[in-house]
Amino acid sequence: MEDQKIKRVYVWEIPVRIYHWLNALVVVTLAVTGYLIGNPLAIQSSAEAYLGYWFGTVRFIHFVAAFIFFFNFLFRIYWGFAGNKYADWKNFIPYTKKYIRECYDVLKLDILHIKVKPFISVGHNALAGLTYFLTFLAFLFQSITGFGMYSAMSDSFFPKLFAWVVPFLGGDFAVRQWHHLMMWFFIIFAVVHVYIVFYHDYVERRGVLSSMAGGWKFIEKDKPT
Amino acid sequence: MEESPTIYEQIRTSGYSRRDFLKFCAWVTAFMGIEASGIGNVVRAMETKHRLPVVWFHFQECTCCSESFLRSSHPIVAEIILDKLSLAYTETLQAAAGYQAEEVLYNTMKKYKGEYLMLVEGSVPTDNDGVYCCIAGKTSLDIVKEAAEGAKAIISWGSCASNGCIQAANPNPTGATPIHKIIKNKPIINVPGCPPIGEVMAGVIVYLLTFDRIPELDGMGRPKAFYSRRIHDTCYRRPNYDAGLFVESFDDESARKGYCLYKMGCKGPVTYNACAVTKWNNGVSYPIKSGHPCIGCSEENFWDNGPFYQHLASFPGFGIETTADDIGLAVGAVTVAGIAAHAVRANIKKRKLINADIEESKKEGGE
């Protein structure tokens, strides 16, 4: 059946989708284990310490997830140069007037509900792209501080690359504090992110929610993109 | 340098036997983290090296570093530094006073220019031209700069000289500044702690004597031999941490069992020091062993990173005991409220648009 009004656009390629869901999984894991490391539950037992290792396991999961998170993030940066135009790095950095104007338009249309000339952003809209750019900075900050703290208890070369972070920020305590505070950025981002996706799916019905599963969006042909 | 008895000769004259001397060398070698084959180097250095001229300054501080040093468990330590190293000047111990004391200081600085070791205890106030700490009519700022000029190396004793300690805590009314931020062109060894462990202090000095070079330092200028590991990593209570066994109150059953003090605000996981290995007072104990969380006294800003009995620090500007989690939760609540408001408003504002599409869809479906 050929629909005259709607065209299908393949927006998110497989690597982007895998990146997205892997990232979602490890970020949730990192936030949960990270919160536990900061505020451990005191599950006491009368057993001797050598019989238990649950807190050590929580930390181990945090570290493994951190490595996956970091290299997944590196891969996404690579894909910003290798992927299709919707995955391109240019979607994330506000370096043109047009980009900034679109940010304002999205703000008016979707956040403040002020009428503007109708337009469609097929991939990320400019404001979303900018927000993801901020999250990439947060990813970077969290990776640097995390591996900085990790470097002291590791002999392998990779975490050692981050050993400069601790003296730079004035000791482990400060690094831990910033790392912990930044966790809340991730939590709040996730809440807003999920809501906004539902909002777009509800109001625009272009298949945003399922696009990250199948890769396709459905765009009206008669509206300017 | 003028010919004078070697350190070994002086130790012997003080009444120690060769056996005592060798025991001391083996002991201090172990403390420095040098392998057993290095004992010979230490012995040879002590036997052949002469007096090392030392000036020891006291600025904004409480003298706890000197006290700690004097209580170093081996008697030869005090003997070596205070008698034999030619401690030319130290405000709290010297017999001379007034002009005599200043004369000794300046004679040493002139005679041994480029050779003397400068030890500093205490931070240096820099606000208002440094008037908050003056000795013999000079500000400590001027004294430090003048003495550093001819020093071979500088050792910053304690947290005061290494990172400012308590007097540099917010709002730092005197502009208390650690030595490494004032002197840039000399090798500086930071030996933080409030106080540092006496054996650590002795180890650093003997290392300098033995090898004539600065020990290997970490990113914050601390000797790696003593400051490369966290107290947490060497703590005997660590298995309790990994097993998730935590003290939750100072008088609970877990405290009696000696569980981990992490939830009581122990700063062991962020503090680099040798307390858990070397321990204090002749290896008797250290704070955690005595049931009290580490307060992180050898870390920069430890005073501002409080409260001591809370794992997460309170956040400056948000009132006492407001942690990152409280702030995060508050921002989260505001976010959820904003989302709810937005959802309601979206349903009102976009109602027409959504309804029109639903109507259209019905029509198309009916065709």
Image (cartoon, coloured by chain):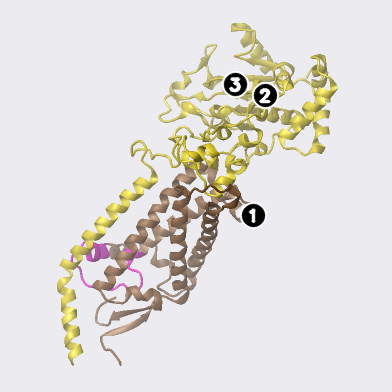
Q: Which residue is mark 1?
A: A156
Q: In terms of depth relative to the viewer, which is nearer, B83 or B179?
A: B83
Residue A9, horizontal then vertical, whole percent: 36, 81
Q: Residue at x 47, y 72 (%)?
A: A18
Residue B127, horizontal then vertical, whole percent: 44, 24
- Label 2 sits on what residue type? Ser
Q: Which residue is mark 3?
A: B146
Q: Residue furthest right?
A: B18
Question: Which structural element holds mark 2?
Answer: loop
- Colour of chain B as rendered: yellow
Q: Which quadrant holds residue B19?
A: top right
Q: Establish if A194 lies above or below B140.
A: below
- Foreground mark, 2 or 1, reads 2
Q: CA distance from mark 2 to mark 1?
A: 36 Å
Specify the subunit that label 2 lies on.
B
Assess disc 2: are there few (<14), some (14-19) or many (≥20) residues with their C-alpha within 10 Å of its C-alpha. Answer: many
Specify the subunit that label 3 lies on.
B
Q: Establish if B49 lies above or below A14.
A: above
Q: Which residue is mark 2?
A: B72
Q: Respond whether the residues carrying marks 2 and 3 are from the same subunit.
A: yes
Residue A87, horizontal then vertical, whole percent: 42, 71
